[in-house]
């Protein structure tokens, strides 16, 4: 019912999706700093810039297995007119040259091994006879000035390589360790309280009521906990409040410490606003209610004792869409990330998609690889209570407020929900 309630009606005081996200982000400041072993820090954000403790590579080194030479000694060497040089050194990975390269000689070097001073290049082994004797035949001079990687070309000691706010990806883990850091300063992971509400809800301790058809499962709590974990937060479960402002308020007051709060349900007109009434009674500041989007328009937002609070709608798909659009960016802001807004991708509509217009619509779509890139097809009925079409979705297609028809083949912007296609 929610998805039809306001169709076609003017909605002058509702915020646009972008305005709402701006308001949310403006209310979120990074949590305190803590120290973590690098290997435990994946997904967190650096609290301060990180400088390298070393030059990497630490020495001029060979990019090839081959022979370090001076260009003057191999100039003009070809298959037909090879040049033979005595081998004066043999540097394997982990070893060091005996000294500078003696003029008129070659030094055998392995990939990554330091190149002796004076060498101008490394002749790859394929351009030699292999140099198995104590001399080597050079059969091409094309590498005479190549294949030496300079010391410090990747990292320079003292240089800030990673700015504050950088997300700790596997590449960042590798680079922190290469720079010599066993631990890093990161922002704490947000603890996110989750409160469901509705007299119709039950949890597993009451599953008989659900199986008897008298209640429905409190699935939002579990879906939200999973979303929170995937977004780098730690869920704090507050359970189910009854359909009254009093019950919602008491559950929030009794909650263990949290950095952000999410409630689901009880924010649409039909619910007599009891979540909003409870939040107002607790002193909610800087709030907004209603966003020009569907699903998810009745979302409520505000700040309670400096912590962001999201009153999400009750329908499971509305919960997920509003989480992706607003809560995830907010949790990233709390966790100190420098990139907060979701990546969108482009594709084409595989079939005509129509929307009532006036609101930004998020349609659940399945993606296929087509001849002109990604093609998006609706996953089925788009009602905000139909979680099945969310389960099947690879992305949310975003239909702007000013559009009512997207023709088959027309370009679309989408928020990806997966990283895998085939
Ligand atoms: P409401 O916003 O309270 O009108 O709820 C909208 C719809 O979402 C109703 O069909 C509710 O039964 C459903 N709903 C509310 N809370 C939950 C929940 N925690 N888990 C699953 N469905 C819910
Ligand atoms: Mg309800």
Image (cartoon, helix red, strand yellow):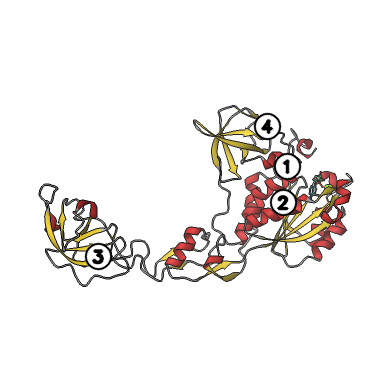
**Position of 182 compared to 103: left or right?**
right
Q: Quadrant of the N terminus?
A: top right
CB of mark 2 near ligand 1 (< 8 Å): yes
Q: Which residue is mark 4?
A: 355
Q: Which residue is mark 2?
A: 223
Residue 126 placement (x, y as % from top left): 23, 51
Disc on the earlier residue, 1 or 3: 3
Q: Which residue is mark 3?
A: 115
Residue 188 placement (x, y as % from top left): 61, 66
Residue 14 location, quadrant: top right
Q: Which residue is mark 1?
A: 387
Q: Secondary structure at mark 1?
A: loop
Q: How dense is the environment of label 3, judged by Cα within 10 Å: few (below 14), some, or many (20 and up)?
A: many
Q: Nearer the viewer, residue 357 or 138?
A: 138
Residue 74's disc number: none
CB of mark 1 near ligand 1 (< 8 Å): no
Q: Residue at x 15, y 55 (%)?
A: 137
């Amino acid at each position: 019912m929610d998805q039809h309630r306001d169709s076609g009606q003017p909605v002058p005081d509702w915020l646009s999706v972008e305005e709402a996200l701006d308001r949310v982000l403006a209310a979120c400041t990074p949590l305190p700093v803590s120290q973590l072993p690098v290997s435990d820090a994946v997904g967190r954000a650096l609290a301060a810039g990180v400088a390298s403790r070393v030059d990497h590579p630490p020495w001029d080194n060979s990019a090839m297995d081959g022979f370090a030479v001076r260009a003057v000694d191999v100039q003009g060497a070809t298959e037909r007119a090879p040049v033979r040089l005595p081998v004066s050194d043999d540097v394997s990975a982990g070893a060091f040259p005996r000294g500078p390269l003696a003029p008129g000689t070659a030094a055998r070097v392995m990939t990554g091994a330091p190149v002796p001073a004076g060498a101008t290049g490394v002749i790859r082994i394929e351009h030699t006879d292999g140099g198995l004797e104590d001399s080597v035949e050079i059969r091409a001079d094309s590498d005479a000035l190549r294949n030496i990687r300079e010391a410090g070309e990747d990292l320079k000691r003292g240089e800030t390589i990673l700015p504050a706010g950088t997300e700790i990806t596997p590449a960042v883990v590798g680079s922190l360790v290469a720079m010599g850091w066993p631990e890093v300063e990161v922002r704490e992971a947000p603890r996110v309280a989750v409160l469901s509400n509705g007299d119709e809800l039950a949890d597993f301790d009451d599953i008989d009521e659900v199986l008897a058809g008298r209640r429905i499962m409190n699935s939002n709590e579990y879906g939200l906990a999973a979303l929170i974990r995937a977004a780098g937060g730690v869920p704090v479960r507050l359970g189910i409040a009854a359909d009254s402002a009093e019950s919602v308020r008491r559950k929030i007051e009794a909650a263990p410490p949290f950095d952000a709060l999410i409630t689901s349900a009880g924010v649409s007109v039909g619910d007599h606003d009891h979540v909003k009434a409870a939040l107002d009674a607790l002193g909610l500041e800087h709030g907004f209610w209603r966003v020009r989007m569907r699903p998810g328009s009745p979302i409520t937002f505000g700040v309670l004792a400096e912590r962001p609070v999201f009153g999400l709608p009750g329908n499971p798909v509305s919960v997920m869409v509003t989480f992706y659009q607003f809560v995830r960016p907010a949790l990233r802001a709390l966790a100190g990330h420098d990139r907060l807004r979701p990546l969108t991708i482009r594709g084409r509509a595989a079939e005509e998609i129509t929307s009532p217009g006036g609101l930004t619509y998020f349609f659940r779509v399945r993606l296929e690889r087509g001849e002109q890139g990604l093609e998006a097809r609706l996953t089925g009925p788009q009602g905000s209570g139909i979680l099945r079409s969310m389960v099947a979705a690879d992305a949310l297609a975003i239909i702007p407020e000013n559009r009512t028809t997207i023709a088959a083949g027309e370009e679309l912007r989408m928020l990806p929900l997966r990283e895998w296609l085939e």
